Amino acid sequence: MGKSPRFALAPLVLLLLLAPAPGARSYRVLYAEQYYKLYHQHFYQYPEDTMENIHYLELALQADFANPLYALARIADRQEWAQYRTLFKMHANLKLTELYLTLGSKYDKMTAYFYNAPWKRQNLESLEQAESAYRLALGYWRESLRWAAGVPRLRYNLEQIQRWEDEWKRVVTGDLDYRQIIDGHLRRLARVRAEFQAMDSSTY
């Protein structure tokens, strides 16, 4: 867990994305909440944008939490603090599930068109990258389920993270089930891969 797919350009892309702008004032990023705040939604989900967000969220999962005074919700006692941290872990894993699904979709091939036979090798390599991303998504989905199970019921309503609580309800009730979605992608991908493998690229 926690490792990004081995895309050839990924290390270079991340170095470029994370390099500070000239003259920019730097500050130390130490805590989970700080890394989470660096995660942001993109209107267009280019692979490098998705990889950037994956990087920040994976660091957030590895980092310590800030003092409860600096949490992303108002925390009153140790019980609320415990629920907050568990929901944070569930939410971050859920977002990583979605990001890896998005990344996989950028490399996936919905159909093996016969006229793509001259690029059979490239298409198979792209499918391999898509499968890697989907399998990582599945791993993060399992982690989401594990953390969601750590909250038997919502004892406290933390208003500032209401969206996380809504996600928890959808996960524990089965209303949100990424396993079915990912399994469907993997089955279709295997079928498309077999069709590409059966092509004779020398005839075009």
Image: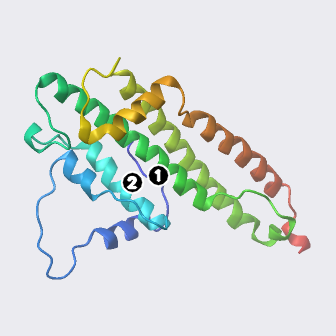
Q: Determine which quarter of the picture holds residue 181.
A: top right
Q: CA distance from mark 1 to mark 2?
A: 7 Å
* Direction right: furthest residue: 203
Q: Determine which quarter of the picture holds residue 112.
A: bottom right
Q: Is residue 35 above or below residue 179?
A: below
Where is residue 192 shown, x and y percent of the image? 77, 52
**Viewer-nearest residue: 90 or 192:** 90
> Badge 1: how crowded within 10 Å, few (<14), some, or many (20+)?
many
Q: Amino acid at mark 1?
A: Leu
**Viewer-nearest residue: 145 or 58:** 145
Q: Which residue is mark 2?
A: 54
Reading the chain from its start, which is encountered first: label 1 or label 2? 2
Where is residue 9 shown, x and y percent of the image? 46, 68
**Image point 48% across, 56% down: which residue?**
6
Q: Which residue is mark 1?
A: 99
Q: Are marks 1 and 2 in contact (CB under 8 Å)?
A: yes
